[in-house]
Image (spheres, helix red, strand yellow):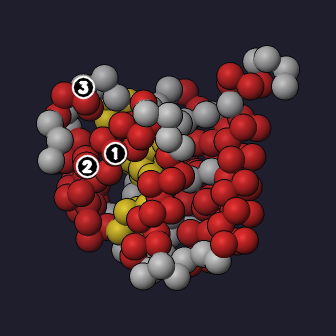
Amino acid sequence: MTNNSFLTDKRILVVDDEWDVLESIYDHLSSARSLDITSDRDNALDCIANNPYDFAILDIMSDHGIELLEECVKKDIPAIILISATAPRELLMTAVKKGAVSYLAKKHTDELKTLIYQLFESQEQGDPAWKLMFKKLQEITNGDFWTGSEKKWDISKGIQQRLLHSKDIVDKGI
């Protein structure tokens, strides 16, 4: 397990329509520098537009999950973790294509801090965040999430979405 110190400089947005889930996530991540929690779409859009975040945790099954994901990618939020009680394979694939970097079932919110730590540790080591998500998705589906060609296509679409909004690239005029 990780200690809390890696969260002390992180700014986090959490959006979910279930208050018990939000409370649980708050309990796990309360040591963060900034922790904005909301169940409201408009408030979430306002937060995304007006605050820099190190990562966002979004309920992908909500009516506005994909929309919020797209807005987070446009604002170049480096890590977007999707949460859901259950999510259809097609929706998860859509989220990957739109730039999500990880997924966690709501029943495993006690593992959230460890997942976040792993994402930032991977990033510091130069590994793409998607690598960890693909490994986890393969594990929860017993190796049956993607075929080889699907994986390559979906990865490239997700990377493409990220690069279109990356300040490092856009600022250079590439």
Q: Earlier in the sequence, mark 3 or mark 1?
A: 3
User: Label 3 vs label 2: CA separation?
Assistant: 15 Å
Q: Which residue is mark 1?
A: 118
Rendered residue at 66%/72% (across/down): 148
Which one is closest to the eye, mark 3 or mark 2?
2
Q: Is residue 128 left or right of residue 142?
A: right
Q: Amino acid at mark 1?
A: Gln
Residue 58 visible in the shown view? no
Q: Position of residue 31 (x, y in %)?
A: 19, 33
Report which quarter residue 36 is drawn in: top left
Q: Position of residue 10 (x, y in %)?
A: 34, 29
| Disc 2 residue crowd, few under 14, some 14–19, many 20+, Cα 10 Å | few
Asked if the residue at tag 2 contacts the one at tag 1, i.e. Cβ–Cβ closer than 8 Å, the answer is: yes
Which one is closest to the eye, mark 3 or mark 1?
1
Q: What mark, if any, has residue 114 been given in the picture?
A: 2
Rendered residue at 61%/60% (across/down): 96
Q: Which residue is mark 3?
A: 8
Q: Earlier in the sequence, mark 3 or mark 2?
A: 3
Q: Residue lying at the far top in this picture: please name it.
A: 172
Q: Amino acid at mark 3?
A: Thr
Q: Secondary structure at mark 2?
A: helix
| Disc 3 residue crowd, few under 14, some 14–19, many 20+, Cα 10 Å | few
Q: What mark, if any, has residue 65 been given in the picture?
A: none
Rendered residue at 50%/27% (across/down): 51
User: Label 3 vs label 1: CA separation?
Assistant: 16 Å
